[in-house]
Image: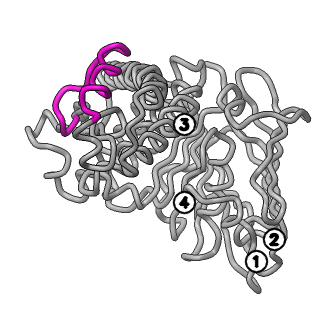
């Protein structure tokens, strides 16, 4: 199978990194160091090589190294499907980020044609117990990995919905204005539904076909108002019929923006939200691996994986199983932890970086082993 990996990464004035230059090969990358040293900042930088706002959903200004207050720059070399691509991203002080792909100005969505990046971060450990918004964001990140244009469709829907909500809140009664917005929402909403269902089907197939040490969750989509209309015409009719009730509430009460993602652990017969903390972590790992397997088949290469503090809540057996599955998949996984002992089971299958903080600057040292 073809490879997808990052072979060079340079960071300039990005978060805790005044300057950093990493050269790696396609194997997994194990990173360790004390809390606050700058490990997660490396992962965040790599997450910017995919469409969207990155693993912290931060603004360009928030990524600036505070001590200088200058803009930041990221550059890298991506090996993707037997081709090499140069990626450069920067944000000047007070400006949004810009992208150059192979020395040409490009929109963010263009990154989806070059690389697919998935991540698992500690804040996602609360996924099954937090509000539906977090699960919806997780769902759409999975969808975006399969359908890079999904981001543009959701932006179109959200923009029209915000304008409709403004009219509702102001008690505006202008049918043609509502109808124009509702048509845009219906068109985008129907496509959002198709993208989500297609992606869940691909993940289900990848789960069924795999031999894995992690629990296989059954995923489903629910809506607080009952089943969501399936077609563009039916969704448009629902927006129109619900307009009076929406006006009373001051917001749109039905639509794909209120979908929730539910997971059911079939082997134990329990919902994910009722599982233990360790079991919920294992379910998340299972989903990320299934997403990666589905992408390997759909994109032609396994995605780059970013696994921040991945060993948390995993016992030694499951940790070893995770490393075995990553190696079998052939994915370049960037993993962080506080100590080298967390990666001992990887052996020569990985490359190692120790990250430290000196005088307010993050530094990385390449190691031969995790010893």
Crowding near the residue tagged with mark 3, few <14, some 14–19, many ≥20 C-alpha atoms within 10 Å: few
Query: Where is mark 2, residue-wise?
Result: 18
The relative height of residue 234 versus residue 275 in the rendered view (above or below) is: above
* Residue sitting farthest toward the front: 173
For the magenta stretch, what is the residue range? 223-243
Residue 155: numbered disc: 3
Image quadrant occupied by the N terminus:
top right
Decide if residue 248 is on the left or right side of residue 104. Answer: left
Q: Residue at x 60, y 49 (%)?
A: 53
Crowding near the residue tagged with mark 1, few <14, some 14–19, many ≥20 C-alpha atoms within 10 Å: some
Query: Where is mark 1, residue-wise?
Result: 361
Q: CA distance from mark 1 to mark 4?
A: 18 Å
Which mark is first along the chain, 4 or 3? 3
The percent coordinates of residue 37 (x first, y second) are 63, 74
* Residue sitting farthest toward the right: 103
Q: Residue at x 47, y 44 (%)?
A: 162
Image quadrant occupied by the C terminus:
bottom right
């Amino acid at each position: 199978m073809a490879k997808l990996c990052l072979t060079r990464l340079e960071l300039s004035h990005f978060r805790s990194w005044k300057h950093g230059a990493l050269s790696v090969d396609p194997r997994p990358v194990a990173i360790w160091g004390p809390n606050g040293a700058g490990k997660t900042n490396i992962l965040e930088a790599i997450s910017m090589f995919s469409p969207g706002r990155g693993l912290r959903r931060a603004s360009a200004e928030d990524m600036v190294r505070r001590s200088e207050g200058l803009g930041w720059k990221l550059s890298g070399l991506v090996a993707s499907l037997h081709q090499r691509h140069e990626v450069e991203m920067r944000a000047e002080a007070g400006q949004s980020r810009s992208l150059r792909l192979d020395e040409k100005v490009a929109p963010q969505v263009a990154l989806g044609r070059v690389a697919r990046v998935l991540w698992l971060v500690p804040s996602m450990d609360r996924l099954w117990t937090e509000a539906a918004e977090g699960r919806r964001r997780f769902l759409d990140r999975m969808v975006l990995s399969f359908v890079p244009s999904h981001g543009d469709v959701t932006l179109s829907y959200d923009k029209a919905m915000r304008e409709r909500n403004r009219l509702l809140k102001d008690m505006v009664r202008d049918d043609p204005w509502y109808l124009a917005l509702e048509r845009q929402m219906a068109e985008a909403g129907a496509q959002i539904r198709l993208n989500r269902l297609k992606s869940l089907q691909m993940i289900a197939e990848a789960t069924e076909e795999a031999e894995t040490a992690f629990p296989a969750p059954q995923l489903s989509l629910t809506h607080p108002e009952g089943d969501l209309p399936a077609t563009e015409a039916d969704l448009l009719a629902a927006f129109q019929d619900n307009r009076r009730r929406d006006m009373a509430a001051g917001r749109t009460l039905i639509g794909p923006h209120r979908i929730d993602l539910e997971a059911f652990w079939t082997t134990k017969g329990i919902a994910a939200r009722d599982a233990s903390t360790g079991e919920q972590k294992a379910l998340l790992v299972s989903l990320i691996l299934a997403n990666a397997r589905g992408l390997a088949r759909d994109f032609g290469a396994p995605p780059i994986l970013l696994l921040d503090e991945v060993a948390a809540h995993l016992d030694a057996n499951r940790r070893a199983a995770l490393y075995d599955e990553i190696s079998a998949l052939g994915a370049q996984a960037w993993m962080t932890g506080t100590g080298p002992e967390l990666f001992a089971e990887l052996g020569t299958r990985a490359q190692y970086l120790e990250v430290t903080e000196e005088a307010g600057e993050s530094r990385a040292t390449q190691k031969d082993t995790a010893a």
